[in-house]
Amino acid sequence: MERTSPRAVEELVGFTSNLLIEHGVPEHQAQVTAQHMLWADIRGTETHGLVRLPHYIRRMKSGLLDPKAEPEVKPVMPAAVSVDGGNGLGHPPAHQAMREAIDRSRQYGAAVATVRNSGHFGAAGAYSAMAAEEGVIGIVLSNAAALMAPTGGTEKRVGNNPMSIAVPFGEFPIVLDMAMSAVAAWNIRMAADRGESIPSTWGLDSEGRATTDPADIMDRGGLLRPLGDHKGYGLAFMIDVLTGALSGGAFGQDVKRLEEDAPVNASHTCIAIDVEAFMGANTFEMRVQEMVSRIRSTPLAAGAEKVLVPGEREAMVARASEASGIAYPQDIFASLELLANECGIDFPKPLEKTNLTAGR
């Protein structure tokens, strides 16, 4: 897929924030949402960044998403908080939940915040990384629309529910961010929109057969394949328990896709663990460094260039993006430029080649 000329990250954050404000989102929430969306794009996770912006705008225009919803925070115990997203954007309530969990973990060693009535919140890693960047371990869980069948079944009953764990580390936050399907659903959605085929290991058609046609999965009643089959299904089920059931929000088939004409009704759970409650931050850093060193010193398999820890590749992409800007695939760029033109908002101009110091 051909890429456009790169745009500066800060200008893209400002553009996104201004576009959301234009559609009724309060300024502080627009800024939080823009930052979390660009967190994904900066790291090359384009399935969870600005590619979703047209869908959010469409939902605002159609009344399926309340742009002015303010997250309602309700402490239920000193180290436990409940947040109601009010059927608005998913990023602000998830951000607020992790903020509450981090702050309370400083006092109590660990804290949990649940979120209900939320929207699509982008990349789970954006919130776990909030904690890691402040020296706290972050764990984030979310449910999602049912796109997988339980092991032995043929109907969509389970979401490809994501989880992320982020650990503070001197070089970069170590971030594991993964869904419980073999691949993120939006990779399949984008392949369908682009008329591309997919690996047969990604999903099943409506008859339960492996398929290379993404439309079989996204548009003709097919299924995502769980990661590790019964293991991915089991993890997805338990994540739904810890998010939808625990928060008092929607779960299973009551959580909807962005393409559906209904509130998303997602639920999230954010957990923060203060390292200082267990040992000094420097001691923890040394122990993690030792683990990383052992991993990196693993003898290489044939054809491998380097052994990486979770989030390392994305951290390298992020450094290049910060220096050189983000170059979007042409179809994503076109949809963003269309939104800008509709609202009369200037779209960020390409960076001059002389300013580019690293490739993407």
Image (cartoon, grey):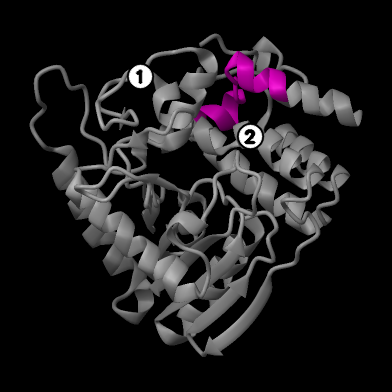
Observer-nearest of 151 and 50: 151
The image shows a total of numbered marks equal to 2
Measuring 70% from the left and 23% from the top, which residue is drawn there? 335
Residue 358 shows in this picture: no
Label 2: which secondary element: helix
Give residue 313's position: percent from left, percent from top.
Answer: 36, 33
Residue 18 shows in this picture: yes
Measuring 51% from the left and 72% from the top, which residue is drawn there? 114
Q: Residue 209 falls in which quadrant of the image? A: top left
Residue 301 lies in the magenta-colored region:
no
Give residue 223's position: percent from left, percent from top.
Answer: 35, 36
Q: CA distance from mark 2 to mark 1?
A: 22 Å
Q: What numbered label is drawn on residue 198?
A: 1
Question: Residue lying furthest bottom in this view?
Answer: 77
Q: Earlier in the sequence, mark 2 or mark 1?
A: 2
Give residue 117's position: percent from left, percent from top.
Answer: 61, 65
- Check disc 1 and give the amino acid type: Ile
Measuring 82% from the left and 27% from the top, which residue is drawn there? 340
Mark 1: give few (<14), some (14-19) or many (20+) Cα within 10 Å.
Answer: some
| Residue position for label 2 | 50
Region of the chain picked out in magenta, as a range: 319-335
Residue 321 lies in the magenta-colored region:
yes
